[in-house]
Image (cartoon, rainbow, N blue to C red):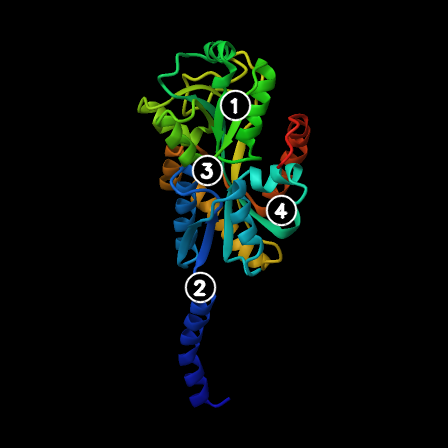
Amino acid sequence: MDRRHFIAGAALAPLAARVAHAQSGPLRFVFPFAAGGAGDALTRIVADEVGRALNETAIVEARPGAGGQIGTQAVTNAPADGRTLLLTPIAPVVIHPIVFPQLPYDPFKDLAPVSLVTTFDFALAIHPDTPAKTLAELVAWLKQDPRRGTYGSPGVGNLPHFFGALLAEKIGVPLQHAPYRGSAPALTDLVAGQVPMVITTTSDVTELAKGGRIRILAVSGRERSPFLPDVPTFTEAGVPITGGAWYGLFTRAGSPPEMVARVSRAVMAAMRDPGVKEKVLRLSMVPTGSTPEELGRIQKEDNEAWAPAVKASGFKPS
């Protein structure tokens, strides 16, 4: 190649790179539940930080429905280029394979782990007008009239759903499950008095409790939540139920390993950044970050650990 053609080619190279980038489009972060809750806020934090680290435009899409399955399936159907990412809690990628025999995706085959993002606990919240200040008082109130025993959750087949089933078994009171399309609409109905109880993440109830709009009776961790230090664990309150959960980032299986690694490194760096950590802690979550291999191991271990409890609940999808 002569010097003139070399110079022309070099001049065109940045243009070609910009065209290729435009054709690939922005990074898409899919949150598989309704917008408005802590999970949605977390997704936006992660999208901003990863986009900045990779010098890419990043957008967030809330794709609610079927307890997280609609958004999850959208990512499994996306191009295998690592540019469509799923930020999800544990249920769609760990619990649903146990529950739903006709699940439209296999999270262990159709998704590639990218990074653990945060960990959190669950909480039982009630309307402040409910005549119960403790879990024991709530149980006594429900036994007086079991028809009161309806609890909302972020969706059918999710861990808060099964916490409710385990709670019913432990206290000897039948509880009716009212699934919502995410935590935000469930808590809206709780605040409005349309549902007497909600089981969801501590991250989604902490600020409402601090504002006096709801009352939290128990949290699911082995120890008290650092965000709700005055709230007992279920075990402390007399009902031996424990277990935490997490948010993780996944992409379509078969995506280029170098792209997965780049995003994973960006997430780990973000979760170590003091400014980002402060934002995440305000959501009542603990920032983590991990390698893809670590998230894959956690996903499989939790699937094995939760299988007996989920099956023992007797839940069958309709």
Q: Nearer the viewer, residue 269 or 173?
A: 173
* Rendered image: mark on residue 25: 2
- Sort mark 1 into few (<14), some (14-19) or many (20+) by Cα contacts within 10 Å: many
x%, y% of residue 225? 46, 23
Do we see residue 273 in this rendering? no
x%, y% of residue 272? 44, 41
Q: Which residue is mark 4?
A: 107
Q: Which residue is mark 3?
A: 182
| Amino acid type of the residue that numbered disc 2 sits on in the rendered structure | Gly
x%, y% of residue 17? 44, 72
| Amino acid type of the residue that numbered disc 3 sits on in the rendered structure | Gly
| Amino acid type of the residue that numbered disc 4 sits on in the rendered structure | Pro
SS of the residue under disc 2: loop
CB atoms of marks 2 and 3 within 8 Å: no
* Rendered image: mark on residue 220: 1
| Amino acid type of the residue that numbered disc 1 sits on in the rendered structure | Ser
- The image quadrant that residue 318 belongs to is top right
> Which one is earlier in the sequence, the residue at label 2 or at label 3?
2
Mark 1 vs mark 2, CA separation in Å = 41 Å
* Rendered image: mark on residue 152: none
Q: Nearer the viewer, mark 2 or mark 3?
A: 3
Q: Nearer the viewer, residue 281 or 133?
A: 133
> Which residue corresponds to the image point at 42% horizontal and 89% vertical from the top-left?
4
Do we see residue 142 in this rendering? yes
From the viewer's perspective, is residue 85 above or below residue 166?
below
> Which one is earlier in the sequence, the residue at label 1 or at label 2?
2
Q: Nearer the viewer, residue 44 or 154?
A: 154
- The image quadrant that residue 159 belongs to is top right
Mark 4 vs mark 3, CA separation in Å = 20 Å
> Among all residues in the image, which is located at the extreme left?
211
Q: Nearer the viewer, mark 3 or mark 1?
A: 3
